[in-house]
Image: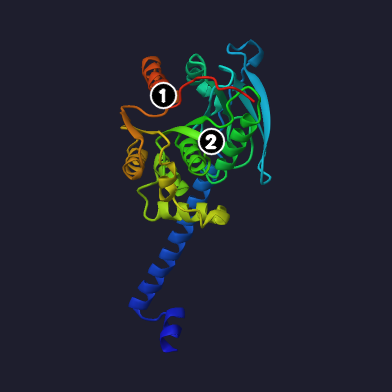
Amino acid sequence: MHILFELRYPTKWYTKLLTALLALAFFAVLATMAIAGFLVYRIVKPQRASTEINMASFPGRPEVLTFEVPGGIGTREAWFFPGLRGAPTIILCHGYESSRGELLTLESALQDHQYNVLIFDFAAHGANGGISTLGYREVDEVRAAVDVVAARSDVDPARFGLWGYNLGAYAALREAEGDKRIRALVVDSVYDQPKQMVKVGVERNGLGGFPFMIRAAEISFEYLNYAHREDPPVSRKLITLTGVPTLYIQAVDDPELAETTRQMFLKAPEPREQAIIAHGNFVSLGDEDKRTYENRIVSFFLVRLPAVGHAIK
């Protein structure tokens, strides 16, 4: 009792010092959690990039599709670019803080080789509101996109390819692990768990060096996504991709995600391929680098998922 009384009403210099240090630590923790909470809000509500494009005048005869994402996530608008009748479909899953409009050159490269191609915006990106879960619920959006295309009469409903970058790569990989319709996969700068993308976001905001800031942000993000607390890392189910050709792309200038992608590649079953590139983020590449990247992606799909038409029943 005397100790508690002394701590509450300090009279000695060392208890006064201890009380001051405890108070300082308490307010430091509060400040860290407050800043981390703000950072997480900024991360899950990214600045949206939306490209206004007149589809009526765009080459490739695009068609606007809409599909509903289960679980109250909402309706999505997609652009479908038809290829050879009965050919497989490639779905492009854009990255964090990007949008479908920034993937049109990659789409054109694939459609030029007779693939059907679909692109859409994730939640909190493009014209869509809401918040990003950095992959937890985005996989439902990818699955709904696959379903709406598979219901068409002019595509092969059992042959799909997926391409994704960071956020899109995680969602694409999770979908491929549970969907036998996915026959080929490209993941660029993928991560094992969404909280790893939170760490990247904190570091990109220049606050990664502050004590406990990253962990505080991860705790805030996990609280927001409590319903997914039992979701395992995607690497635990990589064995389900046995027989599914997968290309893992690492960008040297993005070391955090390059390392997680490398670790994923090492755990992945065959057939697997690895590509190491100097610069990441397809949408920010220069014209020459972008063409080289597009050729690499097209070549992979041409070998692993040939754009040949199958008879449609």
Q: Quadrant of the N terminus?
A: bottom left
Secondary element under disc 2, as helix, strand or loop, is: loop
Q: Position of residue 73 (x, y in %)?
A: 66, 42
Q: Does the image show residue 274?
A: yes
Residue 48's image quarter? top right
Residue 197 image position (x, y, % from top left): 44, 43
Q: Nearer the viewer, mark 1 or mark 2?
A: 2
Q: How far apart are labels 1 and 2 at the CA level?
A: 19 Å
Q: Which residue is disc 2 drawn over? A: 181
Is 12 on the left-hand or right-hand side of 198? Answer: left
Q: 264 and 120: which one is in front?
A: 264
Instruction: Assess whether mark 2 and mark 1 are in contact (beta carbons under 8 angstroms).
Output: no
Position of residue 209 measured from the top left corner of the image (x, y, whole percent): 35, 48
Which numbered circle lies on residue 35? none
Q: Nearer the viewer, residue 142 or 15?
A: 142
Identity, as a three-letter code, of the amino acid under mark 2 = Arg
Is residue 84 placed above or below 124 in the rendered structure? Answer: above
Residue 140, position as x, y percentages in the image:
59, 42
Quarter placement of the C terminus: top right
Q: Assign a secondary structure to mark 1.
A: helix
| Residue nearer the viewer, 32 or 137 | 137
Of the image marks 1 and 2, the number of the one nearer the N terminus: 2
- Tell me the residue that label 1 is attached to: 297
The answer to whether residue 3 is above or below residue 298 is below
Q: Nearer the viewer, residue 252 or 192?
A: 192
> Can residue 123 be spotted in the picture?
no
Q: Is residue 153 left or right of residue 180?
A: right
Identity of the residue drawn at 51% across and 23% down: 103
Check the image and report above or below for 102 versus 124: above
**Kind of residue indicated by mark 1:** Ile
**53 with respect to 222 (left or right):** right
